[in-house]
Amino acid sequence: MSTSQHRTILIIGAGRSASSLIRYLLEKSEAENLRLLIADMSLELAQKKTLNHTNATAMALSIFDESQRQKAIQQAAIVISMLPAHLHIQVARDCVKFKKHLVTASYISDEMQALDADVKANNLIFMNEIGLDPGIDHMSAMKVIDEIRDKGGKMLLFESFCGGLVAPDSDTNLWNYKFTWAPRNVVLAGQGGSAKFLQEGTYKYIPYCNLFRRTEFLEVEGFGKFEAYPNRDSLKYRSVYGLDDALTLYRGTIRRVGFSKAWNMFIQLGMTDDTYVMEGSENMSYRQYVNSFLPYHPTDSVEIKLRLLLKIDQDDIMWEKLEELDLFNDKKIVGIPNATPAQILEKILTDSWTLQPSDKDMIVMYHKFGFELEGQKQQIDSKMVCIGEDQTYTAMAKTVGLPVAMVCLLILNGKIKASGVQLPIQKEVYQPILKELEHYGVNFKEELMPYFGYQI
């Protein structure tokens, strides 16, 4: 590897989530002798993200062009892939071929895990799940779990919650919610099987139809009350975290109180279904879309039929939430050919829930650790709130991007010893990153509490 390659970082994907990580690496570039190659389908976007810095070079890159992709990867010592998760694997295989380290913020796929032996054989580090969730959740959880174990404690309960929300000053609608990340993921959340978790030693399952009615309430000092609905698989990290003997394991998504009950109306109507196409969707009005899910009646209006079906009164806040979305407008047109109900709902919600230029987003993370130490049951609650700077350096971009950038430097500087396909649950990874994140406003406040057990 040439001297120039030795400190060159290739960043593939210059979208929203790359903003903070690029700024961080550019700020470190002089002291750390770094050179950044910022690659994207859009050369204009890549150039914008260089911030006109002398240590950054923009390049147009199609991930599907094998020759172009491999040529770019060969120029670097380490590759950061900020691509959609399903596109990482081609980059990963090239990184094995050309002996380059790799960092992604995405979940480890089966295909990525299958590369582990080859990655280890080449003494490479493929660090995944090093964003927000997954990422900061792993690191902040393992910090406390390891501390409890180091004192001789036994884990009884672990609950973990995370949500991308709108900051209080930008919270201007009845839903107390705006899209801070991919709207489609919000619309489809919880589908594809029952949520499963462990409660006091018993496996529990919540089907999608009931998911948003089984919530847990949380309170964060200075920010008020929140609620959380269960994630699809809370048991995924049971063995990874070493919690095979824990009696309760639960992971959930945070929203403001009242969101889940209101969202459940869409589920009851069938609006979140993504499995079939609605005929004539291109010319369908919002009002016609709503009426599509309601029974026929010769005289009752769409509004009356909807209230009867959902059993909501005209003075109910639930009704006001629906009206606020302009669902009954017969002038607004869907304008999407061959659209599914979920795609149309996403379009309608995007009208109302898009962040305005002056809006800021907010990340809330909350962990509960129940444990037994010296014969006494105790609980630690760990809470983190991060508010974005603006529409470029959002809280989401910061919490996803900064850990990616930080682990990149740890790898380049030889601070991580273990090779292979991995996630950030080792002390050599999470300790320095969590400590440095504090300087960027990502602070966890830990509090010793009485042990309450499972709350739902």
Image: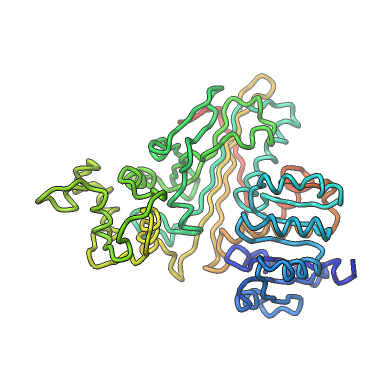
Q: Nearer the viewer, residue 293 or 236?
A: 293
Q: Position of residue 264 (x, y in %)?
A: 35, 43
Q: Quadrant of residue 84?
A: bottom right
Q: Say how the picture is coloured.
A: rainbow
Q: Nearer the viewer, residue 298 or 456?
A: 298
Kindly identify the residue that appears in the image at 67 percent across and 64 percent down.
21
Q: Position of residue 364 (x, y in %)?
A: 53, 50
Q: Position of residue 395 (x, y in %)?
A: 56, 59
Q: Is residue 105 left or right of residue 285?
A: right
Q: Residue at x 19, y 53 (%)?
A: 302
Where, quadrant-wise, is the C terminus in this rendering? top left
Residue 9 seen in the figure: yes
From this viewpoint, which residue is outermost toward the left? 299
* 237 lies above or below 41: above
Q: Is residue 273 left or right of residue 58?
A: left
Task: Return the residue nearer the eye: 193 or 435.
Answer: 193
The residue at the point 62 percent across, 55 percent down is: 85
Seen in the picture, residue 229 relative to 46 is either above or below; the reply is above
Can residue 407 be seen here? Answer: no
Total number of numbered discs in the rendering: 0
The residue positioned farthest toward the top in the image shown = 375
Question: Could you tell me which quadrant the N terminus lies in?
Answer: bottom right
Q: In this image, 142 relative to 318: left or right?
A: right
In the rendered image, residue 236, in percent from the top left (x then y), is placed at: 61, 37
**Can you say whether 267 is above or below 151 in the image?**
below
